[in-house]
Amino acid sequence: MESLDFHYAHDEGKSVWSHCIVTSHIVSGESSYALNFRNYFREEYCKAHGVTFKSKNDLAIEMIEAYETDENELVYVLMDSWYTSKKLIDTCNSKGFHVIAAVKTNRIICPQGISIPIDDFSTRYIHKSDLRSVTVENQGTYWVYEYEGPLSDLENVKLLLSWKNDYTASSKPQACILCTDQSLDLVTIQRFYHVRWNIETGYRYFKELLGFDQYQLLSYVGIERFWAIQFLTYNYLEFQRNEWSKARDSMTLGDVVYRIRQEYFGQIIVNVYHQALERKPLMEILTFLKINIA
């Protein structure tokens, strides 16, 4: 199988022999579509095979730059801490996009002009009286400290240090969320960032419903084509979900797949019934259905 390499898998806590891709997802209203993907190759692999190396941040920047928007469209780019770099945020700013993203607690902030890592600041200087209790729909209650100012090599951002459900003295924040839109309140920032979960549920549907990681192709070109077909299939299911949800309660992609399978099975039954009415021989019906009986 072409282009395999060792890539670190967070769910397994080790490097595994695999392919690696960077993906993007788009959410608008009630619609949630798998948008794009880029292949990632480690620098050592690129040197050995004469391929230009691009980091995961570089690949993410490519997809952001390729995204076309309407003139009045308001775009928020959501990402985890792996992609929160100055280069990527500057790319978003140049396109008029806002960023809401997780950041690691070892990043440097400058409260009152003093440089200090976020985790040190939170354990040494933050007390419960400095926090605000924020309740976000369907997500529970958070204790939040709001900071505005420089963050590492970024000039001015809004940063939320949050503890879910309860706050323990001298503890590091469970999440740090950066926002470049200074006009948003704390609840809206947390609610918007939660939309990023769509990419995680998208991965689950890709793997469990569509077999995204079950290919057995040897050619990497063939594997890329397989992924492209998977993206098209996923988005067809999402389009169908939106259409069917208009006539009934909201559906999941799993509900859509189940309904399609049931309707297809029903069509087979109807076809067999009509064939039987026409007194077609059993073997002819089985041959038409491509069913072999020993």
Image: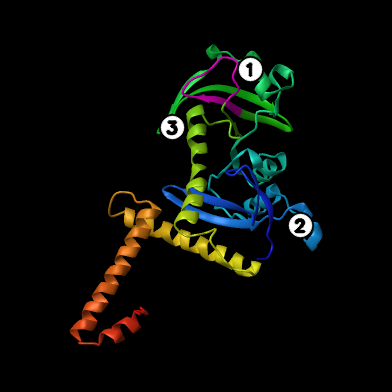
Q: Can residue 111 be seen in this view?
A: yes
The kind of residue on which mark 3 rests is Gln
Q: Quadrant of the C terminus?
A: bottom left
Residue at image point 63% right, 17% down: 123
Q: Determine whether 222 is above or below 276 in the image.
A: above
- First-in-chain label (1 vs 3): 1
Colouring rule applied to residues = rainbow
Q: Can residue 242 be seen in this view?
A: no
Asked where in the image residue 281 lies, by quadrant, the reply is: bottom left
Q: What residue is shown with label 3?
A: 139
Q: Determine whether 49 is above or below 31 in the image.
A: below
Residue at image point 65% right, 14% down: 124
Residue furthest to the left: 277
- Between circles 1 and 3, the one closer to the viewer is 1
Q: What residue is shown with label 2?
A: 45
Find residue 62 and report its horizontal and vertical position in percent. Answer: 67, 54
Tell me where the magenta segment starts and ends, as one range: 159-173
Asked where in the image residue 287 lies, by quadrant, the reply is: bottom left
Q: Quadrant of the N terminus?
A: bottom right
What is the chief secondary structure element of the magenta stretch?
loop
- First-in-chain label (3 vs 2): 2
Question: 10 and 193: which one is in front?
Answer: 10
Is disc 3 in contact with disc 2, using a CB cutoff of under 8 Å? Answer: no
Question: 165 and 136: which one is in front?
Answer: 165
Is disc 1 in contact with disc 2, using a CB cutoff of under 8 Å? Answer: no
Q: Residue 53 carries which label?
A: none
- First-in-chain label (1 vs 2): 2
Can residue 170 be found in the magenta stretch? yes
Q: What residue is shown with label 1?
A: 123
Label 2 Cα neighbours within 10 Å, binned few <14 / some 14-19 / many ≥20: some
Asked which secondary structure carries label 2, the reply is helix
Label 1 Cα neighbours within 10 Å, binned few <14 / some 14-19 / many ≥20: some
